[in-house]
Every structure is written in structure tokens, then in C-alpha cells.
Image: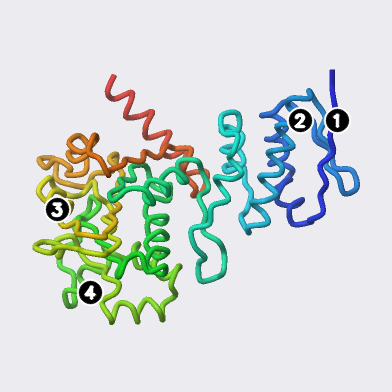
Amino acid sequence: MESQMKFKVDNKEFERELFGKFDENIKLIEQKLNIHIVLRESNIVLIGKENNIKKAFEVLNILKKEVENKNKLNKQNISYILSKFKVEDNLNEQLDYIICMNTKGIPVKPKTINQKQYIDNINNNTLTFGIGPAGTGKTYLAVAMAVKSFKKGEVNRIILTRPAVEAGEALGFLPGDLKDKVDPYLRPLYDALFEFLGAEKFDKYMERGLIEVAPLAFMRGRTLDNAFIILDEGQNTSKAQMKMFLTRIGFGSKVVVTGDITQIDLPSNKNSGLVHSLKILNKVEGIKVNYFEKVDVIRHKLVQRIINAYEEFENKKEK
């Protein structure tokens, strides 16, 4: 027997975001929850089996809160919420966690359950590994957490590093001084910091040595106390480099290592230090490993399709 339930719409922006282009968002909700949705005056009317429309009502509440928090709705993030809804009763609460605000005043929050778990792991452990494909927020969220800890006085400085390994291409001689030569490798880390601090504050903190962005080779011989340290592109470290880095951890420090083990740019005769460390450290207390999935990709929906296509191709090769 079909039932009906009304959902009050008092926000035109939410209405636009919810329906999407050519009603594509609302059609997706109808399809996934097997209900019918119509807009009548200032109400969305949900029509279908009672259990399904109750779920839809809760989904709409989550989506409304997303719009109120300045997040855009699209088929990708709606699909994720729908796919996880049956097993995540408190999804609304989890995704409402604000890490910090960016320079535009927009709250930075997890967009998927795995992202929230990643944040919890960083909060609760000295060393966290974030492993997964491009676009899952591994580095972005780690930098956000670093800025939050720095602003709260939990750490005295932020150190961001990555190995200077070329992504499958020989760049040859690079002009300029040492900074000019290594900056291209570190640009993604600069970009993330600019978004959270702004160029002026970033430059001021860099001058004072409170923020350091450097190639991994610069970490050798140091002990890093009271710092939030992020090693990005960890899959491109050698075994010796990874061991060197992990043994730099000092008192009062927090460390995040990110990487995509499907995109290793090392020579074929070198093993990845990240892959090696995951085998060794998987049962060590104080260390957590966060594995991201394709569903956590928050870039353009085409990125998920590309990842799927590559995985299918690699699976066929193995067979």
C-alpha cells in the first residue's frame, strides 16, 4: 500500500540543488529508493511504500543540511549518501563535522564516511596512513587537519614533504636555485596551504619557520618534535626513505602519510617504501591505515569512471 509524506521546502537554493539539471538528482533518489517525488507549492511530496518514503525523508534532511553548509549537490555525492544510508544511521551527524574554514569562509568537512573515519584516525593516532586513488581528499584533508592543529596550538609547526620523483617523464635540467628546482614537486602542498591560510599568512609563517614545505631528502638527520608532519605521494619513497622518515617522529608530533599504491613512479627495480611499510606496521599500536575507495572520489564524476576503466583493464591483464 502506498503512503505519502510531505517535506517542507523553504529554501529556493535547496530546491534548485535538489532537483539538479533536468531533474537528474531527484530522478536518482526516486530510482534508488523506489518512490515518486512531486513538487507542490512549497512542499516535496514523497509517494511510495512507507519504509521507503521514511528513508527518503531522512535523505532529504541530510541533503538540505549539505546545502545550508554551502555544499553543492550532484549525482555523485547523492549516490554515495544513498548507497551508505542503510548501514549508517547517524550519517547526518558524521558528515556535519567541521574541520576548519577556508579563506572564503566555507567550512571544510568530510564528504564520505571513509573521509570521516580518516579524520577520526588522525585525531586519535600518532601516525595515520591514507591510501587510495586520486581525488579522495587524502592530502587536502590532512593539510586541513594540520592547519586546525596549528591554529589551536596543539603543534608548533607544520612540515609538508614529498619525494621529488618525476611522474613517468624525464624533466631534464631545471633552471634556477634549489627552491626553483623543487617547487614544482611541492606545488600541490602549497596550493592546499594557500586555501586554508591565504598567501599573506602563509608567507609570514614560512619566514618564521613555522611552516616548512620541503623535499623528503631534507628530513634526513632531523628529529621532529611538536609538529604536524605530512608525507605526500608516499608510494614514491624507497624502503630506506620511508624508514628514515618514520623514524623522524618526535614527541608531541602527529604524522600523516598519503599515497596511491596503484600509481608508483619509481623505477621498476625499486620497491615502494609505502607498500613495504604497510606490511610491516599493520599491527603496531598508535598507527592506523585508512583505505579509500572509488566511491570516495570527490572530483568530477568522470574521474571515478576512469579509475574503474583502469581497474578493469588491469584485472583482465592479470587473468
Sequence-first disc among 3 and 4: 4
Element under label 2?
A: helix
Give whichever of discs 2 and 4 has the lower sequence position: 2
Give the amino acid at mark 1: Gln
Report crowding for label 3: few under 14, some 14 to 19, many 20 or more residues within 10 A (C-alpha). few
Task: Tell me the residue at 40%/40% (across/down).
Answer: 292
From the viewer's perspective, tell me whether residue 310 is left or right of residue 229.
right
What residue does disc 4 label? 180
Mark 1 or 2, nearer chain start: 1
Q: Residue 247's mark?
A: 3
x, y percentage for residue 25? 69, 41
Of pointers 1 and 4, the one earlier in the residue sequence: 1
Q: Please name the residue that numbered disc 1 is placed on.
A: 4
Rendered residue at 17%/36% (across/down): 280
**Amino acid type, mark 4:** Asp
**Based on the displayed image, in which of its 4 quarters is residue 53 positioned?**
top right
Q: Which mark is residue 53?
A: 2
- Distance in Å between CA atoms under marks 3 and 2: 54 Å
User: Within 10 angstroms of label 4, few (less than 14), some, or many (20 or more) residues?
Assistant: few
Q: CA distance from mark 1 to mark 2?
A: 7 Å
Instruction: Residue 233: give x, y in percent of width and height.
Output: 27, 52
**Viewport quadrant of the C terminus:** top left
Task: Report the front residue among 282 and 29.
Answer: 282
- Report how far apart the C-alphas of labels 1 and 4 lie in the structure: 64 Å
